[in-house]
Image (tube, rainbow, N blue to C red):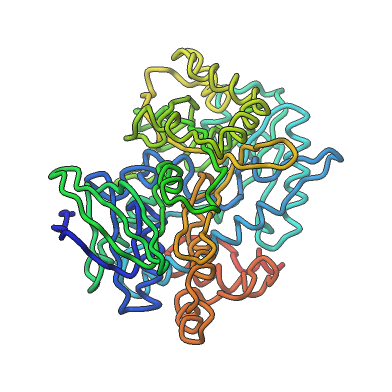
């Protein structure tokens, strides 16, 4: 994409900061709801999807809570908490509705370019973990969104599902696995590029690459004046707008702080970097066809939950293991080592210190991860691939994530492993902080933003238009089993995802 030439002063209705999945989703939704709206998008790098939305940087593709064990914690009484998993599964179904709309309206020519059917599996070993997985399976399959889940402790059956995971494993080892055939692999980089390609063709939409937001100023009339610098020419532009969305991934926190809105006070960020082992042996890649998630190490962040992950990247099948966590003071992969120290302010230093004190196991875990040798990484891989050889895998950098730290009355500050939407009281600015599950639930998050920040959201016209885009809007797929069945059947057909006995499984 070519950077469009900027003028000294521009006045779009909406400014989107960051050219990732969130801005793309919001931009397409707003333009569909109000074709006359004008939108300016500013991205500090020279291409869209260069940070968190890039497939090599994204720690999890197609999060739908089918296999991610950190979404279903075991409570003190031994029961399994399923609320978060159900919410994420429902949100992913809403995302598939929106993506189906993009396919049906020609924004995306072929769904095969960005989404594929890949079974989602959880795999554990040891008596205690097997018992946990059984309880999780029993708890989740009571809900219609998970009714198709399969559970097995039979090594032969699991070997049929994931042969490379079982090859060379002790036959006496107690193992268990769950499988959801409905799972998907989503290339959010490709999906996002499709949406930006569409937006750039729309009248009143301008995408500015290599443009960095320097500062914000609030006018008495409620509008925002934003200072933007062209990183190539160093030319500055002033942008006047009625609404700002900060969707800059790890870079959102510093921008939120610059906005000065009271609602943004007290938020901090804890950066976590990552690395992948990427398989370079075609025979192994072809033999594995699943996303296999295990249990996280004590103290590890959710983005570091180990998984052996089949992906489709740039039209080729790939196999990744990891991510291995690390620590960097950068908030973005292409950021500055000063990002963390410069984010510390008087209003957030107490929450950040308190969160640090209460997360010492996380600190120890990250130190241990940084100190890992190639042999250490191989040993972690061997838990999932007993016959793995180091020469069959290359080490690659993954993306940078910033976990949210927020004020807490009881302990001063807490580290949040999720996404957090921060909005100005008058709805003129919104910022998205955090990471997982992020991209997979982008549509639900942006619908929430529209409801909070745009008074037209409740109008008959916008509601009718939203129903064309997302037919289930205003209803609950988590509560209505029949609606969920029909929705899944439709999106499976439109997105060309093969899923056997879909309607029977969800309505049984």
Total numbered labels: 0
Q: Compared to 474, does 228 lie above or below? A: above
Q: Is residue 221 left or right of residue 154?
A: left
Q: Residue at x 38, y 22 (%)?
A: 392
Residue displayed at 30% across by 49% down:
213
Corner quadrant of residue 395: top left
Q: In percent of the image, x 32 and y 78: which residue is there?
A: 35
- Residue closer to the observer: 108 or 25: 25
Q: As drawn, is 173 to the left or to the right of 252?
A: right
The vertical placement of 172 against 266, above or below, is above
Q: Nearer the viewer, residue 421 or 428?
A: 428
Relative horizontal placement of residue 27, taking residue 64 as reference (left or right): left
Q: Nearest the camera: 256 or 132?
A: 256
Residue 354, percent across and down? Answer: 65, 30
Residue at 29 percent across and 71 percent down: it is 38
Looking at this view, name the residue that lies furthest to the right: 77
Residue 272 in view of the camera: yes
Position of residue 336 relative to residue 188, above or below, is above
Task: Identify the residue at the far front of this view.
Answer: 220
Residue 315 visible? The answer is: no
Q: Quadrant of residue 122?
A: top right
**Image quarter hosting the N terminus:** bottom left
Position in image of residue 423 (x %, y %)? 52, 59
Image coordinates of residue 494 in percent, x first then y, are 43, 69
Quadrant (top left/top right/bottom left/bottom right) for the C terminus: bottom right
Instruction: Point out residue 417 in the picture as x, y percentages from the top left corner.
Output: 59, 41
């Amino acid at each position: 994409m070519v950077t469009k030439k900027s003028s000294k002063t521009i006045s779009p209705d909406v400014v989107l900061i960051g050219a990732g999945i969130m801005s793309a989703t919001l931009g397409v939704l707003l333009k569909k709801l109000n074709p006359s709206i004008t939108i300016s998008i500013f991205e500090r790098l020279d291409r869209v999807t260069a940070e968190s939305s890039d497939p090599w940087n994204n720690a999890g593709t197609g999060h739908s809570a089918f296999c991610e064990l950190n979404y279903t914690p075991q409570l003190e009484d031994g029961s399994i908490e399923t609320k978060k998993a159900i919410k994420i599964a429902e949100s992913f179904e809403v995302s598939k509705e929106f993506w189906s709309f993009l396919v049906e309206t020609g924004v995306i020519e072929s769904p095969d370019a960005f989404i594929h059917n890949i079974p989602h599996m959880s795999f554990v070993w040891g008596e205690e973990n097997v018992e946990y997985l059984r309880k999780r399976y029993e708890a989740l399959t009571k809900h219609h969104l998970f009714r198709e889940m399969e559970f097995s402790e039979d090594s032969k059956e699991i070997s049929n599902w994931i042969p490379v995971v079982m090859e060379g494993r002790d036959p006496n080892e107690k193992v268990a696995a769950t499988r959801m055939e409905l799972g998907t692999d989503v290339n959010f980089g490709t999906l996002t590029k499709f949406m930006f390609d569409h937006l750039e063709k729309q009248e009143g939409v301008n995408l500015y690459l290599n443009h960095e937001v320097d500062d914000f100023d609030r006018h008495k009339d409620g509008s925002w004046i934003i200072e933007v610098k062209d990183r190539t020419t160093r030319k500055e532009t002033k942008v006047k707008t009625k609404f700002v969305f900060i969707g800059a991934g790890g870079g959102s926190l510093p921008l939120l702080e610059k906005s000065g809105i009271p609602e943004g006070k007290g938020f901090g960020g804890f950066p976590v970097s990552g690395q992948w082992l990427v398989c370079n042996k075609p025979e192994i890649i072809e033999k594995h066809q699943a996303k296999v998630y295990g249990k996280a190490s004590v103290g590890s962040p959710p983005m570091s939950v180990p998984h052996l992950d089949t992906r489709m990247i740039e039209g080729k099948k790939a196999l990744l293991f990891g991510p291995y966590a690390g620590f960097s003071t950068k908030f973005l992969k292409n950021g500055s080592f000063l990002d963390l120290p410069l984010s510390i302010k008087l209003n957030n230093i107490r929450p950040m210190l308190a969160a640090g004190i209460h997360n010492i196991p996380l600190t120890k875990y990250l130190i241990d991860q940084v100190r890992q040798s190639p042999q250490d990484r191989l040993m972690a891989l061997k838990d999932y691939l007993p016959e793995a050889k180091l020469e069959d895998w290359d080490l690659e950098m993954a993306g940078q994530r910033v976990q949210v730290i927020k004020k807490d009355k009881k302990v001063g500050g807490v580290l949040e492993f999720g996404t957090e939407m921060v909005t100005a009281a008058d709805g003129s600015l919104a910022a998205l902080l955090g990471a997982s599950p992020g991209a997979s639930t982008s549509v639900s998050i942006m619908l929430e933003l529209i409801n909070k920040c745009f008074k037209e959201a409740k109008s008959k016209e916008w509601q009718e238009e939203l129903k064309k885009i997302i037919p289930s809007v205003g209803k609950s797929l988590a509560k209505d089993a029949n609606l969920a069945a029909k929705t899944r059947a439709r999106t499976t057909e439109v997105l060309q995802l093969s899923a056997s006995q879909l309607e029977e499984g969800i309505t049984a």
